[in-house]
Amino acid sequence: MLKLFNTFSKKIEIFKPINPERVTMYVCGPTVYNHPHIGNARPAVIFDILFKILKDIYPEVIYARNITDVDDKINDAAKKNKENISNLTQRYSTAYEEDMKNLGIIQPTFIPKVTDNISSIIDMISKLVELNHAYVANNHVLFDVESFPKYGEISKLKQKDLISGARIEVAPYKKNSSDFVLWKPSDNDTPGWSSPWGRGRPGWHIECSAMIKKFLGNSIDIHGGGQDLIFPHHENENAQSTCANNSILAKYWIHNGFVTFNKKKMSKSLDNIIILNDLKNKYRGESIRFALLSAHYRQPLDWNDTTMMNAENSLNNLYSILLNNVDIKPKISRQTNVEKNLLNDINTPEAIASLYSTARDLQKAKKNSLKSEIKGILLRESYFLGILQKEPNEWLQKSDLLSLTDKEINNLIRQRSLARKNKNFQEADRIRKNLLDNGISIKDEKDETRWTR
RNA sequence: GGCCGGGUGGCGGAAUGGCUACGCAGAGGACUGCAAAUCCUUGAAUACCGGUUCGAUUCCGGUCCCGGCCUCCA
């Protein structure tokens, strides 16, 4: 039984899909105008786990995670770089896909792009105009918030609160200050498509509404994203879709908390954004993923000096246990404690605690038949979390991060073994120190010496 | 100003009306030529003040502090 916290009700609810034969989930992906940062990675990892859990329960799960490749931030970035817009979006889409792959994220069913779905967007806007939920003013098409009395039901924000808190000048052609743009005109230097309202481009929120309808249907089970999307993005999506389709947009709204840096939200002005690409040279994706799972998804996750060290050490220990049992054949396992923890509103810290418990059991088990059983459980558990899927030695030797070549290392180890055999411990220690200075640590086992970077 | 979250050991981080998980780091021991790894053992926390209760970290009220949203943002 899957339980999820629904932003809409502010309660943990039992998940009951609209159609158990076909479960649908949509997660707001990135706007591709710069390198993905650690905050982009968090929802991707969380919903990756939820996707796996759902796939395990239901016969068909359709998961769409979009790429927003039409946006004024993109236009600005391209202008600044003096770069062609499609070049820029292509470059950063690829970067995003690579970073996600590096984090061990499996492919969603669909990765729709806005530029491929302009006609669906125009169709939906036309429908909203036709139904008097939208109006044309000053070459823009705007959503008429007053036509949707439930506006604010997701974010729990009231009209008057929004107005009093408004920090931005209201465009004079808006009927209501909360009305938002569905379509806006483009000049010749800006990307645009022909439409009933002239050459232009979609506003920020309509693309998700249109792509959800096209790829998943009018009403979906789960709609997810970062907490910052609750308002205005999801509020506006909900208004558009509900009005255009005359049916609810999503049954469960799931939002993840922020990644903070030293307790502060990452932002450009503070210059504290952690770019995944910068992390990649020092740490492996799996460590980053593990770090992202260390806090419950609705809590803030603080990124600081020790976050990655902690994750690396933890994974090293877990992989060491797997290495100790490398010859044990895992037995296929059924449902595990980790899954139970994940079914409980994706409680990843508790799941990790269960994983450790299994790992300890594996380490302690004496009989091979028991080891085989526990190893099967451990591997199944770590599959859902998306970790520990590599060969232990591959992980521990960090073959992907190079200093000395493997050949050089093995040579030195051979020399050291010889020195040890001759009780020349001074020489043996000298070689070990030399290796250590190069970032190689070794451990002597019964009949061989293993090394790790 | 309006609306939300949150304050748990050295650090990270769950859970709970009744011995406070788990991890990382630390300490001691076994093992080792010495290490490392592993195993065993171990110290260490619920912001503050009231209230309800046999019992509160958990529920209620207040205080202080931190963060977020109301503008683009995962």
Image (spheres, rainbow, N blue to C red):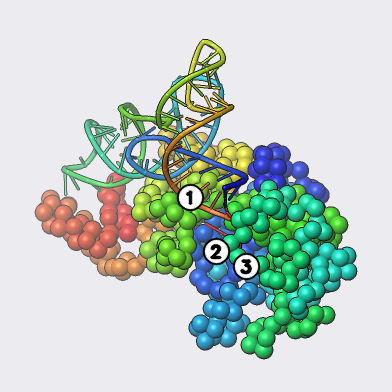
Q: Which badge, 2 or 3, is on the more N-terminal residue?
A: 2
Instruction: State which quarter of the image contains the C terminus of chain A.
Output: bottom left
Total numbered labels: 3
Examine the image and state in which quarter residue B17 appears. Answer: top right
State the residue position of label 3: A169
Residue A117 appears in view: no
Q: Classify mark 3: residues with Cα within 10 Å, few (<14), some (14-19) or many (20+).
A: few
Q: CA distance from mark 2 to mark 3?
A: 37 Å
- For residue A100, which numbered disc appears in the image? 2
Q: Position of residue A308 (x, y in %)?
A: 39, 54
Residue beneath the point at 80% across and 48% down: A18
Mark 2 belongs to which amino acid?
Answer: Met
Tell me: residue A353, above or below residue A157: above
On the image, which quarter does residue A166 sit in? bottom right
Q: Residue A385's x, y, as percent?
A: 55, 49
- For label 1, the SS is strand
Q: Amino acid at mark 1?
A: Leu
